[in-house]
Image (cartoon, rainbow, N blue to C red):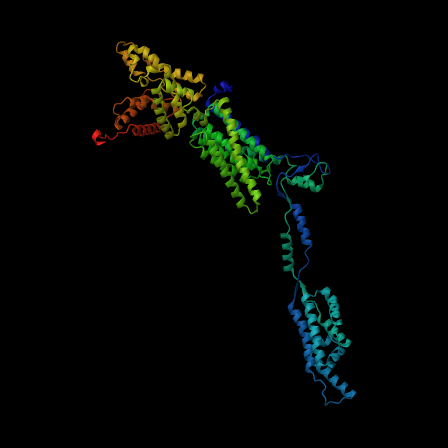
Amino acid sequence: MKIRFDKLKALSKPIQLSVALAVIAISIFLFTISNVYTETYEIERFSNASETIRSPITIEDTRETERRQREALQSVDDRFEISQEVTEERIEYVAELFDAIASVHQPNDQEETDDNSIERSTSEKLQELKQILSSEITDQVSDEVLLTLIAIDDNEKEVAYELLTTSLQEIFNEGVQREQIESSVKQLNQRLQYSSMADEIKEALFEIGEFAIVENSFFSIEETMEAERQAIDNVEPAMIRAGEVIVREDQTITNEIYDKLTLVGLLNSDRNIFPILGLLIFTLLLTAVLAYSFVYYIDSVYLDMKRLFALVLIVVFTLAIMKFISFFSTDGNQLYLLTPIATSSMLLRILYRERLALIFSIVFAILATIIFNGQIPGSLHLEAGIYMLFGQLCVIITLIGIKDRMAILKAVLATGVVNILVILGFLFLSYESYQLMEILRYASYGFISAVMSGIVTIGVLPFFESILGILSDTKLLTLASPNHPLLRKILTEAPGTYHHSVMVANLSEAACEAIGANGLLARVASYYHDLGKTKQPHYFIENQMGMRNPHDYLSPKQSATIILAHPHDGASILKDHRLPREIIDVAEQHHGTSLLKYFYYKEKEHNKEVREADYRYQGPLPQTKESAVISICDSVEAAVRSLDEPTRERIDDFIQSIVQERLNDGQLDDSALTFKELRKIKQTIQETLNGIYHSRIQYPTTKKEDI
């Protein structure tokens, strides 16, 4: 049982379109509002949370980040710079001391060996040594240490020098700060204790080392500041991720939790008005684009109430499917790849035209970026939008010019391949490494999406075709089958009419495709447009086939009554067999209210009072471009077929005269055909007929003896 639109049909088309656009806009708004709007709460500090609350957005917790930076800054130790000048200076003092000791004269074998002479010699050497040493050394190094070093032999002196300078160099290289001088001296003492030298030499070296060790590591403000800067830079920002649990049910709202709730906007009810305003603007922009497209690019034949109702159903169904899948889709499972988005493009392409399907494919792709954003306000899932756009475009391209019932299967296979390619493109563009099983899993999602789209399309098409009474291309292909009972009826009962209808179908399809009208509809409607002639087929000249014309036995009025009745007879038969309204309209309208000239003028020969209205078809006038084209092709084909010698010039003249006569008689006034389209129609019909009735070469007759 078909849905009735009687009350709605009474509304004008602009109002019907406005209602449909309003419903579409409301649907878009309602299905996407949860993706931009977040619920706010009235919560007090130190109360218990009534539910688990998650962050709706990803945002930096600046307070936590600053706290981490302070901790990192406090952990940075002061940086010190070791002065090589100080190190070299102190080592040079030690070298100066040992060089000076080496320069004083040692006692030789000829010198006296008595105690007084030794004391005198040592005293002289000490005085000489103190004279050549720097005051810094003589002031801090005791005479006993100098005498000890003077008394040791050269080998011991060399070992002592090497041990002392090596130890000092290591200590200085580690850096000696002011507060570390004492510990550095102890460190030197420990090093000296492990040597095998005599104790008095160790003590002397220790005193010299104690003199040499001074502060050589000084605070560096530049290095300290650089270390602090690096410590701050190494601190990762404290992020609150979208979906992260801020507080669990029955958990106490501490100051820290309260601050986080404030930061993500869950306590600010005023803040939520802006996403709603943004979504409202976005929805109005999309609706405006749709409205402009309907007004300027979509044929008004597709804006009747049934088709607008079907369009709204397709939009709501598509949005509902996307929204449902978005509840289960996450970054980890990518279930959005399973969305059978190609269903919408298949239905729009089959039930409407390519242009409408293309417009909505872009709209659905844009909406997918919002619906699959994980309900994170302000973010868009661009991959989902791109994926669904390519799938829909593939369907539209594949279904252009449907020629058979396998078109949907071909579209499913092509869309599956395109989906897989898009998915592989995303995987290979990413920096992540995927296992083979993951790649196969995601690729299978794309193919399953295409298959599901085909299954859903096949499943819901009967609803639109039968319940809503919408004529689709697949339905037209079914009606075009020669095995259809009505076509077989024409073929068997009126074969001449059948041949005429096939010729008209060829002409009409070519002409409609030339002007962008529905060529398939024109072809199928042409097959059935003269079905009424089967009621009395022999009264139409194409079916008489050598028999005497029965109109010779009738008056012009009787003949006209039979001829004028065939459009409505055909429409009556088509209604009885429940054929689509578009086919019935063509049967009724293909003659419009044109005049049956032959019988009118024949009657006028002996009845000057004859009324012209009695010899006109009842109409109505052709209401669509397809119906108008068929009416022209019907007259042209019948006229050209009657020509004895259909030359190019005569064919062109006939076409021009018929079209001009139709225009002058007002038969094309309601069809919305433009003069530009009429020129294309005439040109296409001329080319097609000239191809059929082109002049053939006359071959000479072959004699029997030449065979």
227 to the left or right of 658: right
Report x, y in % for residue 680: 34, 29
Q: Residue 66, position in %: x, y?
A: 66, 48
Total number of numbered labels? 0
Q: Nearer the viewer, residue 8 or 551?
A: 551
Q: Where is residue 29, by image quadrant?
A: top right
Relative depth, front residue between 504 and 208: 504
**Residue 220 location, x and y as percent?**
65, 61
667 lies above or below 216: above
Residue at the location (73% across, 65% down)? Answer: 180
Q: Quadrant of residue 584?
A: top left
Q: Residue furthest right?
A: 115
- Relative height, residue 61 to residue 589 (above, below): below
Decide which of 624, 506 is in the foreground and name it: 506
Q: Residue 446 placed where, x, y %?
A: 53, 38
Locate residue 198: give its quadrant: bottom right
Q: Is residue 200 visible?
A: yes
Q: Is residue 385 left or right of residue 497?
A: right
Residue 530 visible, this angle: no
Pick the front one: 188 or 519: 519
Q: Quadrant of the C terminus?
A: top left
Residue pictured at 42% horizontal, 23% vertical:
483
